[in-house]
């Protein structure tokens, strides 16, 4: 009984706790999966690096392109995971006071990806500072994007270090950026260029915030356009299937009910499209279908 109650609390927290909770949960799920694979396959199994780490060279990236995404949710060391998640939780929580959950998600994902690409680019421009043999793993670049975006947007917002020392966001952000910059070239196994790349994306993500030039706004519009095209294609395919069926009077009961259900689904999809883009955005097939349905 107590176990079910605890599980329900976790479920409710995930569902209603905010995007920062979901991001932490996804990171936790990947961390547990990695620990399970390490225990099963061994810590040096090539599958682990192939799936969860991003190579520091272009050949490795081209052969494992997914790694620029999977690596930003992956941690092998518990302390690395713990510190990143604490930082993500508090930075994400503050971020959501001023921005939407979708913007937090996009800043995390694309900030992390941008940091990885910057690291790869500079590995050839400045090869003396980056080892091509050390893979990149961890959410640090993505979290840095969130933190710097918040610091640039609300530089005077204060945080309390250890619950005592009051520090403005811009000062804390400057400290982290300078720390990474001055640590470039050190043998500390930290991908400082990933952090700096994430910081740069965070800065760009709040520039021209209310303009179509904003980088996150552009990304969001691009993704929305792709979704609409996929939805339209899927809707058109289903419409052809519905319109190609036998007349309703000659169908069996099961067929009739299925056709009726599909017709309602298509009507809902078309009405949703009209509310988004207007009647003129409908295809000829969709207009004909809507007209036939309204004539019944």
Image (spheres, rainbow, N blue to C red):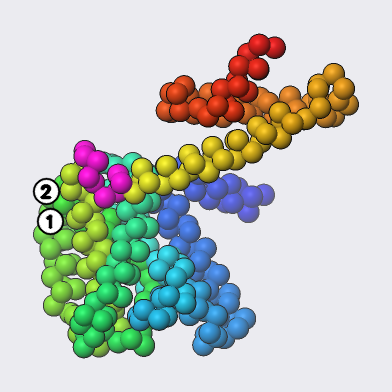
Verify whether residue 212 appears in magenta: yes
Q: Which mark is residue 170?
A: 1
Quick check: 175 left or right of 55? left
Please name the residue that numbered disc 2 is placed on.
Answer: 156
Residue 63 on image: x %, y %: 47, 77
Going 63% across and 23% down the picture, which residue do you hit?
A: 289
Q: Which numbered disc, 2 or 1, marks the residue that appears first in the sequence?
A: 2
Q: Is residue 206 above or below residue 70?
A: above
Verify whether residue 122 appears in magenta: no
Going 35% across and 81% down the picture, which residue do you hit?
A: 57
Looking at the image, how many numbered discs can be counted on the residues?
2
Within the image, what quadrant is residue 268 found in? top right
Quick check: 29 left or right of 168? right
Which residues, given as a range, are shown in magenta?
210-218
Answer yes or no: do the residues labelled 2 and 1 have beta carbons within 8 Å? yes
Q: Is residue 82 visible?
A: no
Residue 144 on image: x %, y %: 26, 62
């Amino acid at each position: 009984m107590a176990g079910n109650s605890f599980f329900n609390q976790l479920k409710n927290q995930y569902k209603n706790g905010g995007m920062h909770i979901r991001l932490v949960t996804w990171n936790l799920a990947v961390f547990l999966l990695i620990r399970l694979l390490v225990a099963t396959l061994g810590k040096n199994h090539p599958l682990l690096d192939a799936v969860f780490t991003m190579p520091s060279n272009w050949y490795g990236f081209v052969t494992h392109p997914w790694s620029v995404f999977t690596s930003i949710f992956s941690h092998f060391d518990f302390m690395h995971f713990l510190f990143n998640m604490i930082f993500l939780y508090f930075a994400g929580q503050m971020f959501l006071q001023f921005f939407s959950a979708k913007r937090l998600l996009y800043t995390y994902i694309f900030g992390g990806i941008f940091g990885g690409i910057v690291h790869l680019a500079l590995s050839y421009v400045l090869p003396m500072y980056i080892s091509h043999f050390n893979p990149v793993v961890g959410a640090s670049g993505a979290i840095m994007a969130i933190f710097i975006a918040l610091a640039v947007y609300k530089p005077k917002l204060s945080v309390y270090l250890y619950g005592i020392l009051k520090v403005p966001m811009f000062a804390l952000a400057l400290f982290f950026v300078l720390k990474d910059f001055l640590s470039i070239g050190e043998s500390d196994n930290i991908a400082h260029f990933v952090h700096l790349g994430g910081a740069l994306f965070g800065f760009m993500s709040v520039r021209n915030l209310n303009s179509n030039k904003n980088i996150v706004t552009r990304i969001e519009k691009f993704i929305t356009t792709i979704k609409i095209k996929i939805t339209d294609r899927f809707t058109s395919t289903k419409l052809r299937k519905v319109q190609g069926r036998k007349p309703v009077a000659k169908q069996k009961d099961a067929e009739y009910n299925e056709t009726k259900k599909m017709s309602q689904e298509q009507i809902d999809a078309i009405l949703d499209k009209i509310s988004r883009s207007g009647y003129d955005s409908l295809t000829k097939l969709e207009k004909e279908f809507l007209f036939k349905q309204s004539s019944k």
